Image (cartoon, rainbow, N blue to C red):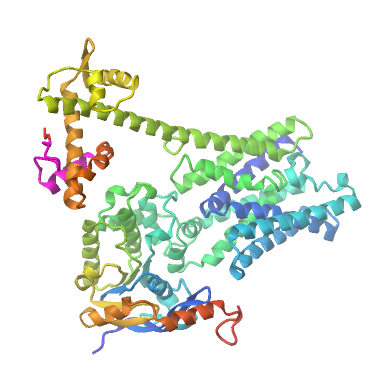
């Protein structure tokens, strides 16, 4: 029997400033796996995650999570942005950032209470960051900032986690402890999708791979798709005709569909 | 108008602009605030021309209209053309302000400047405000304060991490619009007291000054409200006591004084505190180098009890005089060095420190040669700066990683205590 699909992407095409960065991405992801998204720089890995999360709107295609539209299952999904996407010189402590994970559940005028704080502390502990709870976030190292972001995501207590480069700028020991935590979460029945850069550890870390380079090169169990041939296709440069077409679309004076305005 | 009412008004305005300005500042929208302030001028003039009255409601309505229009235009220019935000701000700011001045001049020609009193909007004149102006000011300030209290979490989230805010399902556009709208309201209210030209200062200077003193958002909001209110009180008292003086410039002078004081004297972040810290570090490095030189001299001739003259030290390593003598005296006060006649020697504690510096220097050299594969004749200079900053924790890690090596890459002994 086929496992339930936790993510379904149907023919997603996504553009920045009219220039497509992802073409017709189509896949189904089984639940309960630790999935890696790999591909060269500028391949559209982050764009894929943002589109799955509804942060970017695709030109065409649609996404289903848990078989539903995103808005119906929002509480079961958590997103970890790239560490560099925010200004860390923001007046907040590590604990403040983790508490942001609870904001969506709290309504207007509702303040953070003691139980919320305890839960946030528990999440910080999961990442070994409890001693830094009151530290101003600009004073944390890159790896510590990354762990604060992960703790914030844990605080949402979701079923599906989408993480954009959680291992970037993290030392070897921290990476080990993070991957152990992700494995543990997987064993608890969570599904995790991770944008990853280090091909050395792919076999060891991931059950499933999405190989991306402006289009989806492969989606499948690591043992089947992590092959020399598919790697060469993924990292072998952009497809020339595809990039030329993207360039033409970018410079077009009209939208790419007949009824579309710019 | 009674001075008490004016003071109450500037306190309310201070709280509203200090707190909404905190978000303007954190979202790096300071220049946008300046542009909006300038863009409300044609709105004020239009409000007057269309209705023919100075009823605050119509002036505020006109100001809100052109203020919001300017935000829309700036965003549209950035989205639809290849121009960047700084250019869009400059174009819209000067364009709207130019139209505003034309309209005001037209009004003054046709209605008489004394009668309209619209010129108070340029530099602000609290004393010229009417009773109805105050009612509007209080209402708007209270609305702003209530909104910030109600949407604190949402405003915080979109200011820090917009993508994450979207990912948890927050209607980011709505809250961004709300923040902009509240900013326009505060600007429209504030220009009567501070004036169009200087309004951006009341919005952004309090938060940027307060940021030097606190790392907590709630405290930042409170402190910047306090700074704005105090400057408001001081400025309006002064302009009230000197007749015919506009309020705005005085308020901005006090704001700027607080900003300068914050930049200079704030603990940790302030310029003075940073300079002191860097001076302390330089002094420590100088001291380290003297202690180390004692060790090197003794290592060279094998005699650890001989006292050394300052020229011996200087022959071994370059030290400036009289800095060296002064530093030796400092080290004596710290009981690291003792003196007899013109010669100097290390105390027990001095030896411990000297050995540690030499040790971490040589450990670092070992680390560079072994783990970064840097050749041994290239590692000394790097170690010479790094040695001062290796923490005790890192020292232990280095020892463990390198398994307590006996010698450095140049085959000199590494001293362990």
Quadrant into which the C terminus of chain A falls: bottom right
Question: Which residue is the extreme one toward the bottom?
Answer: A1
Question: On screen, B16 above or below B227?
Answer: below
Q: Which picture quadrant has residue A70?
A: bottom left
The answer to whether residue B143 shows anywhere in this view is no
Q: Which residue shows up at 29% across the image and 17% down it?
A: B329
Q: Is residue B412 magenta?
A: yes
Q: Which residue shows up at 66% across the image and 38% down it?
A: B251
Q: Which picture quadrant has residue A118?
A: bottom left
Question: On screen, A249 above or below B357?
Answer: below
Q: Which residue shows up at 26% across the image and 21% down it?
A: B331
Is B6 displayed left or right of A118 in the figure? right
In-front residue for pair B398/A229: A229
Q: Does the magenta stretch include residue B351?
A: no
In-front residue for pair B191/B6: B191
Question: On screen, B95 above or below B333?
Answer: below
In-front residue for pair A127/B129: A127
Is A18 displayed left or right of B142 in the figure? left
| Span shown in magenta | B391-414
The answer to whether residue B274 shows anywhere in this view is yes
x and y, in percent, of residue A97 in the image: 39, 55
Number of numbered labels in the structure image: 0
x and y, in percent, of residue B311 in the image: 25, 19
Quadrant into which the N terminus of chain A falls: bottom left
x and y, in percent, of residue B7 in the image: 67, 38
x and y, in percent, of residue B49 in the image: 84, 58
Is A132 displayed left or right of B84 in the figure? left
């Amino acid at each position: 029997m086929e496992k339930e699909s936790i993510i379904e992407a149907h023919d997603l095409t996504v553009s920045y400033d009219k220039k497509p960065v992802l073409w017709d991405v189509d896949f189904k992801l089984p639940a309960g796996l630790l999935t890696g998204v790999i591909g060269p720089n500028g391949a559209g890995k982050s764009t894929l995650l943002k589109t799955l999360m509804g942060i970017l709107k695709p030109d065409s295609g649609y996404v289903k999570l848990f078989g539903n539209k995103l808005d119906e299952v929002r509480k079961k999904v958590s997103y970890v942005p790239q560490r560099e996407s925010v200004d860390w010189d923001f007046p907040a402590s590590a604990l403040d950032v983790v508490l942001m994970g609870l904001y969506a559940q709290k309504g207007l005028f509702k303040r953070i209470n003691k139980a919320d704080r305890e839960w946030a502390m528990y999440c910080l502990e999961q990442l070994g960051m409890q001693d830094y709870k009151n530290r101003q976030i600009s004073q944390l190292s890159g790896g510590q900032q990354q762990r604060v972001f992960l703790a914030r995501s844990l605080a949402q207590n979701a079923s599906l986690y989408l993480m954009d480069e959680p291992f970037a700028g993290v030392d070897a020991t921290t990476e080990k402890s993070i991957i152990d935590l992700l494995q543990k979460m997987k064993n608890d029945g969570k599904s995790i999708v991770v944008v990853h850069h280090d091909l050395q550890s792919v076999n060891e870390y991931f059950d499933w791979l999405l190989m991306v380079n402006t289009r989806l090169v492969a989606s499948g169990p690591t043992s089947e798709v992590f092959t020399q041939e598919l790697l060469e296709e993924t990292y072998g440069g952009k497809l020339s005709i595809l990039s030329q077409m993207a360039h033409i679309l970018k410079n077009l004076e009209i939208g790419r569909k007949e009824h579309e305005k710019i | 108008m009674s001075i008490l009412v004016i003071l109450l008004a500037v306190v309310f305005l201070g709280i509203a602009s200090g707190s909404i300005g905190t978000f303007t500042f954190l979202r790096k929208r300071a220049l946008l605030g300046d542009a909006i302030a300038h863009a409300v001028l044609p709105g004020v003039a239009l409000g007057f021309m269309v209705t023919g009255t100075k009823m605050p409601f119509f002036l505020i309505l006109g100001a809100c209209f052109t203020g919001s229009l300017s935000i829309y235009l700036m965003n549209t220019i950035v989205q639809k053309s290849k121009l960047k935000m700084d250019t869009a701000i400059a174009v819209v700011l000067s364009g709207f302000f130019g139209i505003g001045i034309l309209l005001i001049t037209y009004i003054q020609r046709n209605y008489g400047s004394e009668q309209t009193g619209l010129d108070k909007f340029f530099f602000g004149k609290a004393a010229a405000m009417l009773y109805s102006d105050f009612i509007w000011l209080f209402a708007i300030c209270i609305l702003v304060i209530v909104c910030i209290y109600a949407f604190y979490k949402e405003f915080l989230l979109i200011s820090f991490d917009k993508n994450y805010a979207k990912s948890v399902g927050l209607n980011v556009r709505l809250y961004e619009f709300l923040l902009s709208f509240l900013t326009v309201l505060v600007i429209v209210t504030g220009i009567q007291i501070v004036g169009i030209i200087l309004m951006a200062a009341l919005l952004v200077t309090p938060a940027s000054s307060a940021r030097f003193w606190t790392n907590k958002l709630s405290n930042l909001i409170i402190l910047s409200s306090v700074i704005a209110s105090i400057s408001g009180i001081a400025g309006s008292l002064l302009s009230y006591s000197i007749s015919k003086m506009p309020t705005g410039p005085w308020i901005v002078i006090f704001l700027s004084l607080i900003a300068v004081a914050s930049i200079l004297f704030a603990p940790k972040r302030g310029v003075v505190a940073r300079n002191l810290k860097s001076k302390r570090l330089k002094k420590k490095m100088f001291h380290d180098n003297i202690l180390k030189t004692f060790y090197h001299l003794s290592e060279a001739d094998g005699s650890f009890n001989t006292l050394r003259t300052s020229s011996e030290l200087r022959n071994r390593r370059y030290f400036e005089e009289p800095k060296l003598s002064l530093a030796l005296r400092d080290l004596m006060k710290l009981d690291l060095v003792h003196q007899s006649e013109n010669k100097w020697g290390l105390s027990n504690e001095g030896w411990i420190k000297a050995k540690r510096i030499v040790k971490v220097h040589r450990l670092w050299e070992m680390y560079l040669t072994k783990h970064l594969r840097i050749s041994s004749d290239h590692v000394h200079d790097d170690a010479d700066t790094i040695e001062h900053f290796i923490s005790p924790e890192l020292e232990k890690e280095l020892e463990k990683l390198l398994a307590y090596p006996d010698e450095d890459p140049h085959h000199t002994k590494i001293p362990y205590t």
